[in-house]
Amino acid sequence: MTFEVLNLVQGTTEWKSHRAAHFNASDAPAMMGRSPHKGRHELVKELASGIERDFSDYVQERVLDKGHTFEAYARPLAESIIGEDLFPVVGKNGIYSASYDGLTMMEDIGFEHKMLNAALREAMHEGCTGESLPMDYQVQMEHQCMVCPTIGKVLFMASEWDRHGNLIEERHCWYYPNLQLRAQIVTGWGLIEKEVAAYDPSAEAAPEVVGQAPDQLPALRIDVTGMVTASNLEGFKAVALRTIGAIKTTLTTDQDFADAEKTVKWCEGVESSLAAAKQHALSQTESIDRLFRTIDEISEQTRAVRLKLAKLVESEKKARKEQIVMQAQRSLDEHIAELNRELGANYIPMMAGMFAPLIKGLRSLDSMHEKIQAELACQMAEANGKRDRLKANREHLQREEGDWITLFPDFATVGTKSAEDFQALAALRINTHKQAEAARLEAQREQIRAEEAAKLQREVQTRQAEAFGFGQLASNPAIDDAANATPMTDALPLEEPEKPAKPFAEQSPEATKTAAEKAPIEQRIESGQTMTLGAINGLLGIFAISANTIAALGIATEKHRGAVHMDASDFDAMCVALVAHIEGVRAHVAEHVV
């Protein structure tokens, strides 16, 4: 929908016909229950019938016409403040309409004028803003901004002039669009539209509810001179009982409640007059049984009706209040449930308990209904605003790489933030999650690489053991880190040789002397020149080496008393040969396996 300027003049028949078919800015305060001049129910009646309220000649001349005159006087002053010319405009946007006291040529600044009054003098203090104004003026200007969305601000002016057009007093401030109030206005018009459609002219109550008591009973006259000498008691009884029997005890409308309250007071008066007549009779005689029974009967029935009505007034009025409150609560609950169905989750919580306090101290059912309907519109608009923010923010989380809703278990709360705030929060959580996920995957890959390296090292060790006849590999946690282990020769607790060891093939013959060429083994053992197989394996640490493996490396061993011995001088040669073989295996694996 877009703003459309209409070729209409305010006050003409064509303009009034246009207003009857649209929701107008001047009626918006009444729709929101904020107008001091028109009730919400009155607006519903006008919209349903198409008949606007007629104003007296006094109101027309002294208020309406005078207001238009002041507006014309004030327009040049407003133009000097704005710095641009202003043009009275009538426009519409869909079903909404507004008549502007002035718009600039670019339709970006509006002008609204009111006659200065006590309420505006109090509100428009030094440094005031549009938010300082009474709510009925804010609602009207927000409706105007809604009809013409290009309006960025409205100059609100209140002034008073003398009959010669001389300025007496002027105050002004700037009003800026309030989207939250605008949402309430849209929702409020939606509720009014439903009420207009359901309007029943036959159920329209009188404009002013005034209680009516039953007809006055005839004056009771009793003359007593030892006996009743004259009395209209029988006729009085017939009229009294007939009148009491006709009293209505079913209370529905404001009129019924007002009549009941007035009747309660009437009953109290009848009881008092009967008691006075009885007392008067008693002052003349003490033994007129029939007289007293009749008076007591009438008095008792009057009292019974009075008590019944008094209770009915209290209970029925309470029930009607509860009914109005409960109906509004049901409407709000249904509205929120529908919004949650639209969102696909119960993101918007049910709101309860805000209607009952609004009707405290109100006596008229119409005023209660009007107050609660206005609040219902505000609550529905607030829920609509939450729905719009939740919907937009939910869509923001749905991206090509996936849906990030799992990062928002608190979405029902944070999802109602403004788009800018929520997007900043979403970016923070998504980036944090991505960084954590990347770190987790990198750690996982690193663990896999370490496991693969350890597995490869174990395979190399197994093949080497099988090729050289090594014994069972020792169970040692150091194997898991073998891929980065220090070379074996660095770990041996041997002194650094003075010269680099020669390759095993180039070892001198002295290094490989046979046992027969050496001293007897007993002497060498006693002098500590030999090493047992257990001592050798204790030095190697990582794995257990056998006598056959030592022999395969070209190192001589001897057995003495069941223990395998090797010359200590051959240990270096054995280690060099062992390292050379392992290096050859490693090179082969690196070339053909890795």
Image (spheres, rainbow, N blue to C red):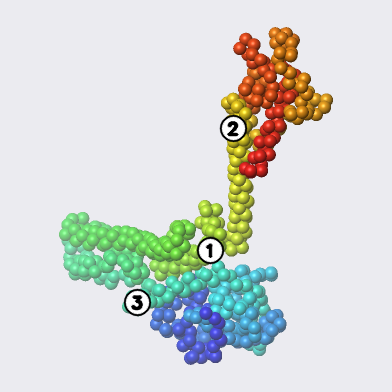
Label drawn at residue 200: 3
Can residue 397 be seen from the camera position used here? no
**Mark before the other along the chain sequence, 3 or 2:** 3
Tell me how far mark 2 sits from mark 1, CA to CA: 58 Å
Q: Residues within 10 Å of mark 3 (few under 14, many from 20)?
A: few
Please, is residue 53 above or below residue 369 in the view? below
Q: Is residue 248 left or right of residue 73?
A: left
The residue lying toward the viewer, choosing from 101 and 412, is 412
Label drawn at residue 462: 2
Q: Is residue 302 left or right of residue 207?
A: left
Q: Please, what is the three-letter code of the amino acid marked with disc 2? A: Thr
Q: Residue at x 67, y 37 (%)?
A: 586
The residue lying toward the viewer, choosing from 338 and 307, is 338
Furthest-right residue in view?
Answer: 498
Q: Is residue 292 left or right of residue 74?
A: left
Q: Which residue is mark 1?
A: 395
Please tell me whether mark 2 sits on a helix, a strand or a loop: helix
